[in-house]
Image (cartoon, rainbow, N blue to C red):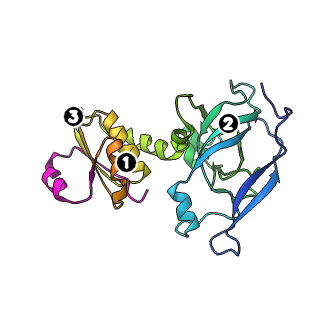
């Protein structure tokens, strides 16, 4: 098993967000990579994607602690680790849970890990909180002990894998509450990433017709490729109002 004593890069690079009203909003830094603690994994970022929550942060619509390294959607590669009981190996591609939790508090024991009393979220933490490599807009991340990781099959490209741990995970969590209706009809409100994923998921659930509406007409080709019918006027929906089995609202994402 790989441990903290194995050779790995002594430094990495990161993009630090100092806040919307700071003199320099973003700064590129080179900083040492700390020694790994038990249970931690050093990974290099293969590809990061930009979540709308990050856009909201840099435009002032969402307030996050600063300075920080933003970014939580990424596919990463194992460089070194201190999880002796795991089957992780150098070079493994991983996706990981955005939330790191203790696994012992009342919320974790009840299955609500994202409400953990010691909750830590990648890309949403101050630079001084932990390793300093807490976000995906960097060359490396230190994955904490309470973070769940999953190996990414070679059949899935980096581009497809990067948003898995946020956009796709959010979609599939919501889909647990959507009934599987063969030949059913569904309406998705929102043509962002979550909307596209929802269209695909509903199609896989067996829905015969899926409509998707939004505000970005340029998304029409993507909606079609994800198994739905683009809807940018009310005509079809008016006719279909009493025929829709499920409505999923994912606007603004």
Indicate the quadrant containing the N terminus: top left, top right, bottom left or bottom right: top right
Q: Earlier in the sequence, mark 1 or mark 2?
A: 2
Q: Given contact means CB atoms under 8 Å apart, are the residues at marks 1 and 2 in contact? A: no
Q: Name which of mark 3 and mark 1 comes first in the sequence.
A: 3
Residue at image position (60%, 45%) is 74
Q: Position of residue 79 (x, y in %)?
A: 74, 35
Of the residues tagged 1 and 2, which is closer to the observer? 1
Q: Nearer the viewer, mark 3 or mark 1?
A: 1
Residue 161: quarter of image: top right
Please state if 244 lies on the left or on the right of 83 as rendered.
left
Q: Does the magenta run of residues contain 200?
A: no
How many marks overall?
3
Q: Residues within 10 Å of mark 2 (few under 14, many from 20)?
A: many
Residue 88 coordinates in the image, percent (x, y)? 69, 27
Residue at image point 33% right, 52% down: 220
Which residue has dot 2 on it?
Answer: 77
Contact, CB < 8 Å: mark 3 with mark 1?
A: no
Q: Are marks 2 and 3 in contact (CB under 8 Å)?
A: no
Q: Which residue is mark 3?
A: 183
User: Could you give the CA–CA distance between mark 1 and mark 2, rounded to whole angstroms?
Assistant: 29 Å
Relative placement, left or right, of 189 versus 100 is: left
Is 62 on the left or on the right of 31, as rendered? left
| Tag nearer the camera, 2 or 3 | 2
**85 and 117: which is toward the camera:** 85
Q: Which mark is residue 103?
A: none
Residue designated by label 1: 222
Among numbered discs 2 and 3, the one appearing first in the sequence: 2
């Amino acid at each position: 098993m790989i441990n903290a004593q194995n050779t790995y890069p002594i430094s990495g690079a990161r993009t630090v967000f100092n806040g919307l009203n700071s003199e320099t909003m973003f700064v590129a830094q080179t900083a040492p990579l700390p020694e790994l603690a038990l249970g931690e994994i050093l990974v290099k970022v293969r590809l990061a994607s930009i979540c709308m929550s990050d856009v909201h942060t840099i435009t002032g619509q969402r307030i996050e602690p600063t300075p920080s390294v933003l970014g939580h959607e990424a596919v990463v590669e194992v460089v070194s680790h201190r999880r002796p009981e795991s089957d992780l190996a150098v070079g493994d591609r991983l996706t990981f849970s955005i939330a790191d939790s203790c696994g012992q508090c009342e919320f974790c024991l009840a299955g609500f890990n994202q409400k953990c009393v010691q909750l830590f979220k990648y890309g949403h933490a101050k630079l001084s909180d932990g390793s300093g490599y807490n976000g995906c807009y960097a060359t490396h991340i230190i994955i904490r002990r309470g973070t769940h990781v999953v190996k990414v099959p070679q059949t899935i490209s980096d581009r497809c894998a990067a948003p898995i741990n946020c956009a796709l995970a959010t979609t599939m969590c919501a889909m647990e509450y959507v009934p599987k209706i063969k030949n059913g009809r569904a309406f998705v409100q929102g043509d962002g990433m979550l909307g596209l994923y929802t269209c695909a998921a509903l199609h896989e659930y067996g829905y015969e017709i899926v409509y998707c509406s939004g505000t970005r007409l340029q998304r029409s080709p993507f909606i079609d490729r994800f198994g739905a019918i683009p809807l940018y006027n009310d005509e079809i929906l008016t006719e279909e109002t009493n025929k829709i089995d499920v409505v999923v609202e994912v606007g603004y994402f």
